[in-house]
Each structure stands twice: as structure tokens, then as C-alpha cells.
Image: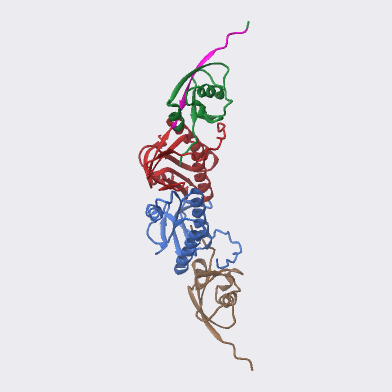
Chain colours: A brown, B blue, C red, D green
């Protein structure tokens, strides 16, 4: 008997134009582990306006840039970052 | 220390914070709000940030720069409402020699622009408002943790 | 305008003189007197100049820089007695974009060091005084008029 | 009959360590034309301390850098420049 997959709750933050398109700045997502940042973003895509996100958006995990294949754990903070425009 | 600031950036204060009798070369950069962008007249703008990550990223850039060159540096980014001419970013690098000061100052500015999660909303003379996309809509290149 | 100055250099004033709403990038460099040179403790120094040529050469460097990049620049060199920490040279370049500002600022500093007829006498903690030869006594390379 | 060579008076300025070695800041030199900056410097070498000048010092003519083979004319100001140490 394989163990039932663990479900993990993560928080997803949206900013600037992405927050406007989805009308949300923060979403709590629960999904079975193992999962990646890309998998979390795919869940965000299912929300109204979510299909406007680019195929591979810039992402951060716990305040650091990561690639979409980075694994996530319960309690992680994932951010979907529109094109940066500092300076 | 807060590296994101909603108050005007104080270049003289930043310079004083890194100068020393052993560091004779001080290179600095100030990036100010321009009155035009892509042919449109800009009245003012608003920077917003993913604040805790922006603070962390600015601090990482400072630490990397100071470990890579024999320099003392200061780096600040403004958030909130800015008028034309206001400084959005200030970078200062002081080193015993000018090569290192210039290289470190340049690194601070390039990395801040590339990595710090800050977004800019431009307010134009025609009344419209837009989020600025410096990539022109290109597919983002994923950034590995540095 | 005097580009050689026996008064302290005023970086903020120089920056204000070149900034404009169209020029968002301002790069600057300050070269200050260090407390050590070649392992000896420096107390202070004295810059002397071939003044009319130094003025002419500084003005030529400014003109070249402004013709080579879309920039407004300011360049000053100090003469007379300087203490440790005092700025000997200040260079500022303001441009619509940072690449041009950095390149122009660097050019100002490199060309000033290479071409402006200024000499430096260092006063050391042991009481001795020396004219500084940055070439280490190498045979000078003749400079053609630019 | 060839014309007698014209003599030209030029002023030579010395600075910093060179002025100290020769104990002079300014010298008036008269020499037959055509002549070059190098030829003028050779005359300075004949003065006490002049042999301390390097074989090919940095020189300026009328406030601009020149090479030693630059021709001189009456009234010119020639400067012998020790190694520059600005910035």
C-alpha cells in the first residue's frame, strides 16, 4: 500500500499588472506533494484572468528567484513576478 | 537597514557612509525619472515592490559586490510616487582604486535592475497610466538563485 | 569657466549643473586623497599644475566627451594643498541612458589622468616629501595632440 | 647664395621635479630654424641639471601635447612635463 499523497498549502502572491489582471494579490493553494513552483502556477492559471499569465513567468520562492522546476513545501511563499522595472 | 525607501534618496549621505581614508575612488550612479518614455510625455510615476524580497535582493547584491571587489558600497531604491527628476536608484562604491569602484558601481546598478522585484507605473500627459515592461513583452528568462 | 580649482570640489553643484528631465542617468566619480601610497603613510599633498594648459586640456576633454556621447558633463581638478579625504578630481556625466553616462564618466576620468598637466607632491608621516611618478620611472610615451 | 638661417626665440617652461632639478621654471632659448621641440629640449639639456631629463620627455607646445618632432616657430611656448600625476 503506497501512502496517500500529502497535501501542502502554499501562498501565491501576485504583483503589479498580474495582480490587476487576476484581481487578486494573494491566493492560498493546496496541492499534493511532490509539487513544483510551475505546478503551483498552473493552478493559478485556472483562476479567472489566469490564462493571461505568460507560459513561463518569472517566479520567486521564499523571497528568492527560482526556476519553475523548484520543489515546493508546505508553508512556502511563491511569487509570480511581472517583468521587473526597477532603476 | 532599509534599502527600499519611500523618502528621497540622499546621495551625499550614501557617499559619506562608504568613504574612508583608504578608499580614494568613489563611483556613483543616480537613476532619475525621465520626462519621456517611448515617445510619450511622462508626468510622474509610481514604483511598487514585493517589499520583503526587494529588501533581501538588494542586500544580497550589496553582499555579493563587497565579496567580489575590495569595496564598500551603498545601494538604495525608491518606492512610491516619484516626480520627473526624482532619483529612483542610487548606487555608490568606494574602493582604493577607481577600476574597482567603477566595476562595483556598475554591478550594483545592473544587478538591481535585473533582479530586484520592483514595478513602475507611468502616468502620461494624455491621462493614461501604464505598467512599464522593459522587456517589451519578451518571454521572461528564469533566474536561478544567485 | 575654471576647471582647475583651489577650493574644495562641489559634487552636488556639478551634478545639478548637468541633470535635466531628459537625462535620467547620472554617473559620477570622486577621486580623493588616500592615507597611504606605496606602503607609506601620507599626511597631505600638494597639486601643482601648468595652469593654462591644464585648463585647456580639461576643456578639450569635456568637449570630446560631449561630442562622442549624448551627454552633459562636468569635470574639475583641484590644485593646491589637499588633506587626506579631500577630492582631487570630480567627474559627472548625465545622459538619457546609463550606458552612456558610465562610459562618458569613465572617459573623463581616464583622459584627465592621462593628459592633464598636474603634479602631486606627497608629504609623508616620516617628514619626507616626494613628487609622485605614477609611471614608476618608465620612459614617457609621447602624446599626439588629440 | 642661400639665405642665412633665421634665429627664433622660444620660451621653455619646466615644472615640478624638472623645475627643481634645473633650479629654473622658465628659460628663453634662441635657436636657428627650422627646429623641433626635441631640438629645443636638447638645448635645455646643456644647462646644469639638464642631463637629468629623460631621453624623450613628455612635451607640450602652446598648451597642447606634441611629439618631439613637432616644428617650432618664434614665440612658441614649449613645456617639458614630468610624469603626470592628476586625479
Which residue ends up furthest to the bottom in the rendered image?
Answer: A1
Horizontal placement of C140 versus B86: left or right?
Answer: right
Please determine whether, in this image, residue A66 is positioned above or below residue B133: below
| Residue nearest the viewer, comparing C62 with A80 | C62
Q: From which residue to which does the magenta span run?
A: D2-16
Q: Residue B71 at what x, y percent from top left?
A: 47, 55
Looking at the rendered image, the quarter that the C terminus of chain C falls into is top right
Task: Report the residue at 49% width, 48% height from top.
Answer: B98
Please determine whether, in this image, residue B19 is positioned above or below residue C66: below
Q: Residue D3 at what x, y percent from top left?
A: 59, 8
Task: Report the residue at 56% width, 25% height from top.
Answer: D38
Q: Is residue A32 magenta?
A: no
Please determine whether, in this image, residue A14 is positioned above or below residue D47: below
Q: Residue B134 at what x, y percent from top left?
A: 55, 58
Which residue ends up furthest to the top in the rendered image?
Answer: D1
Looking at the rendered image, the quarter that the N terminus of chain C falls into is top left
Q: Residue B141 at what x, y percent from top left?
A: 60, 64
Quadrant of residue C5 within the rendered picture = top left
| Residue nearest the viewer, comparing C11 with D54 | D54
Amino acid at each position: 500500500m503506497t501512502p496517500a499523497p500529502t497535501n501542502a498549502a502554499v501562498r501565491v502572491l501576485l504583483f503589479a499588472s498580474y495582480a490587476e489582471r487576476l484581481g487578486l494579490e494573494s491566493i492560498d493553494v493546496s496541492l499534493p506533494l511532490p509539487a513544483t513552483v510551475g505546478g503551483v502556477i498552473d493552478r493559478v492559471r485556472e483562476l479567472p484572468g489566469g490564462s493571461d499569465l505568460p507560459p513561463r513567468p518569472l517566479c520567486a520562492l521564499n523571497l528568492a528567484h527560482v526556476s519553475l522546476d523548484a520543489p515546493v513545501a508546505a508553508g512556502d511563499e511563491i511569487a509570480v513576478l511581472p517583468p521587473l522595472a526597477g532603476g | 537597514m532599509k534599502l527600499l525607501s519611500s523618502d528621497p534618496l540622499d546621495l551625499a549621505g550614501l557617499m559619506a557612509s562608504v568613504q574612508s581614508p583608504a578608499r580614494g575612488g568613489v563611483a556613483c550612479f543616480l537613476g532619475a525619472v525621465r520626462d519621456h518614455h517611448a515617445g510619450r510625455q511622462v508626468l510622474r510615476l509610481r514604483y511598487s515592490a514585493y517589499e520583503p524580497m526587494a529588501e533581501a535582493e538588494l542586500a544580497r547584491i550589496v553582499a555579493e559586490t563587497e565579496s567580489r571587489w575590495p569595496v564598500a558600497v551603498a545601494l538604495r531604491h525608491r518606492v512610491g510616487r516619484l516626480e520627473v527628476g526624482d532619483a529612483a536608484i542610487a548606487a555608490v562604491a568606494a574602493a582604493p582604486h577607481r577600476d574597482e569602484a567603477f566595476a562595483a558601481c556598475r554591478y550594483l546598478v545592473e544587478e538591481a535592475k535585473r533582479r530586484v522585484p520592483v514595478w513602475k507605473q507611468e502616468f502620461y500627459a494624455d491621462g493614461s497610466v501604464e505598467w512599464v515592461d522593459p522587456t517589451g513583452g519578451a518571454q521572461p528568462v528564469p533566474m536561478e538563485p544567485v
